[in-house]
């Protein structure tokens, strides 16, 4: 790719991502289209059977109206009928779980603000709280840095000697982290829940940690739980979200330091034509940065470091 | 706080966050508890009225069974009755939107994988795709760095001269970004949708950009749209998610460079007792880092820079 112009490389990188998205969409469409249609068909059949059997005594549209009300209620995040209808949707543990899902940007959606005041509060709270959480992670990372650098440095030092073995060790490290933060909690969850498979528990833990938070398999939904157990479960879940998210953010930051990412940035960045005035501009910004600001982000630091490395090796 | 031991400071910081979460939960409980209870009561009343009126000709539990089927179908992310029932839930634009919501970790949840293969694919895809997206952002940030540094450097240079004015200018800059990426799209969305308020459009845009993705007010839900319009809307939405997320990630990285964050990290970090062996350990890790790894993350770089600043000023 060395012969391509730099902007072409960027475009190719973006195109590759777009293609990957398209590929994912096509695969999911193939996997999920049939089951979704099947569910739709089942529901329609159940409705038709109901209408056929009892439609005579129901006025036109009464059933649809009731169904619509029930579906809209659920869509707005209010728990439907039955189960824990004695407890409010917004008891304190549930409200705490919702707050944490906001701050970690997970956003399950099983509960959502209905009132205007609630919506405004959520926006302001997230706008202030998410940066605050990021700042907290920055502080905690500094605290945990000595502990965290060891594996990375250990892997990196071995990289020089035996890349293949180091790669395997890095992969092993990654699997260990995944095991502790995804598999173990999933096993616990699976043990506690009677009606879900282990895969569904893993899927839920993964979705929560990655802050994707689809919210389709929230534990406790659809089960008749003792209110005390239910609330305890909410607390456990939000604790898991917080700890897991911290671990994930730290892992992501460590990932951004990997030699491969540096190499990729160097590959794409080192070829940007640097004119004299650009060089001056960059130098003066660097000076400004050193005097006034903390060093810039990983990407620019990586670029600087990679440039230094390539300069040294020239 | 200078008289407190360092670990106490960390504990206080964490406690402050926990208190903030609790406060958010209490406020939301107060704001949202009543509306949610009201919705629940309305649904129960509708159900009771239905039963009272037509219960005579319905066998026991038949209605509950039908409602349960409908609610479960919706909870699994399959679109309910009516509306766009002619199109599959997983047509290509919707599948693309779902894929993008995975990669940006937004995770609306209005669609979710039902099959085992789909769940496994989603996990693998996200596990590979989210880091890839982060790497892409790192590369793009390097590309956009000259453009992005200007406002930050401009604000920082003015900070030395007139802090208050610089703060106002930074706030103005933040509002400008928010206006472009939240308010403008919200206005467009509001104009296109007849049945939602401007606040709801802003709320949806904010939730999407911040990757919280509660998914309760997805445009197009509950409306009878022409299939072509609906699919166009899906494409527009996923384009918005991608662009907006890129902008947000860049804004977050810029935030992490702010002097205040640096000051906070310095405040909490500079007081960690550094023993001789710790110092040696840190120095050798730094040496190792400079030789083998790209510089570390913002937090540690900030700490290093802040330490240098404080050393210089001593």
Image: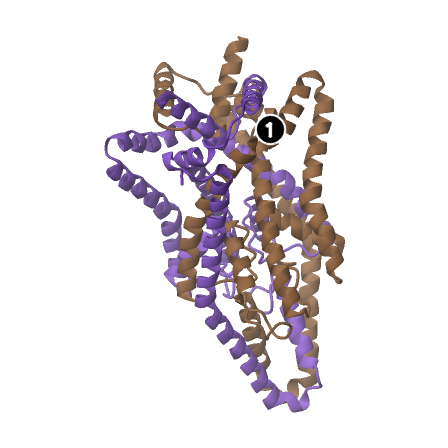
Chain colours: A brown, B purple
Judge the density around disc 1: few (<14), some (14-19), many (≥20) Cα neighbours within 10 Å: some
Q: Residue at x 56, y 50 (%)?
A: B97
Vertical side of B193 occupied by B127: above or below: above
Camera-nearest residue between A134 and B279: B279
Q: Quadrant of residue A17?
A: top right
Camera-nearest residue between A83 and B139: A83
Residue A131 visible from this viewpoint: yes
Q: Quadrant of residue B244?
A: top left
For mark 1, what is the residue?
A149
Q: Position of residue A179 (x, y in %)?
A: 71, 42
Residue A211 visible from this viewpoint: no
Q: Chain of mark 1?
A: A
Q: Residue at x 49, y 49 (%)?
A: B15
Q: Residue at x 49, y 42 (%)?
A: B8
Q: Position of residue A256 (x, y in %)?
A: 56, 31
Q: Residue at x 44, y 67 (%)?
A: B30
Vertical side of B21 occupied by B289: above or below: above
Vertical side of A260 occupied by B204: above or below: below
The C terminus of chain B: image quadrant: top left
Q: Residue furthest front?
A: B3
Q: Quadrant of residue A288?
A: top left
Camera-nearest residue between B157 and B138: B157
| Left or right of A178 on screen, residue B303 | left
Looking at the rendered structure, the secondary structure element under dot 1 is helix
The N terminus of chain B: image quadrant: top left
Camera-nearest residue between B190 and A302: A302
Count numbered badges in the picture.
1
Q: Position of residue A171 (x, y in %)?
A: 70, 32
| Left or right of A196 on screen, residue A228 | left
Q: Position of residue B131 (x, y in %)?
A: 59, 37
């Amino acid at each position: 790719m060395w012969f391509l112009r730099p902007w072409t490389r960027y475009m190719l990188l973006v195109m590759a991502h777009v293609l990957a998205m398209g590929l994912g969409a096509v695969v999911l469409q193939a996997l999920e289209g049939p089951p979704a249609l099947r569910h739709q068909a089942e529901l329609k059949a159940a409705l038709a059977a109901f209408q056929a059997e009892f439609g005579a005594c129901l006025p036109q549209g009464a059933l649809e109206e009731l169904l619509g009300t029930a579906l809209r209620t659920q869509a707005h995040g209010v728990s439907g009928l039955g189960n824990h209808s004695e407890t409010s949707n917004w008891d304190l543990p549930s409200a705490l779980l919702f707050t944490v899902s906001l701050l970690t940007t997970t956003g399950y959606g099983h509960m959502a603000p209905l009132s205007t005041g609630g919506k405004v509060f959520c926006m302001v709270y997230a706008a202030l709280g998410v940066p605050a959480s990021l700042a907290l992670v920055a502080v905690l990372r500094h605290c945990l840095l000595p502990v965290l650098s060891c594996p990375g440095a250990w892997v990196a030092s071995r990289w020089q000697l035996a890349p293949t073995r180091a790669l395997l060790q890095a992969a092993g490290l990654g699997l260990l982290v995944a095991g502790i933060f995804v598999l173990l909690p999933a096993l616990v969850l699976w043990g506690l829940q009677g009606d879900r498979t282990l895969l569904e528990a893993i899927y839920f833990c993964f979705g929560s940690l990655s802050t994707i938070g689809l919210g389709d398999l929230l534990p406790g939904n659809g089960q008749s739980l003792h209110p005390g157990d239910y609330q305890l479960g909410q607390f456990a879940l939000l604790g898991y979200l917080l700890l897991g998210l911290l671990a994930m953010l730290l892992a992501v930051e460590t990932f951004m330091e990997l030699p491969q990412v540096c190499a990729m940035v160097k590959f794409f960045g080192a070829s940007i034509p640097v004119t004299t005035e650009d060089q001056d501009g960059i130098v003066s910004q660097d000076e400004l940065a050193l005097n006034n600001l903390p060093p810039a982000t990983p990407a620019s630091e990586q670029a600087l470091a990679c440039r230094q490395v390539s300069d040294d090796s020239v």
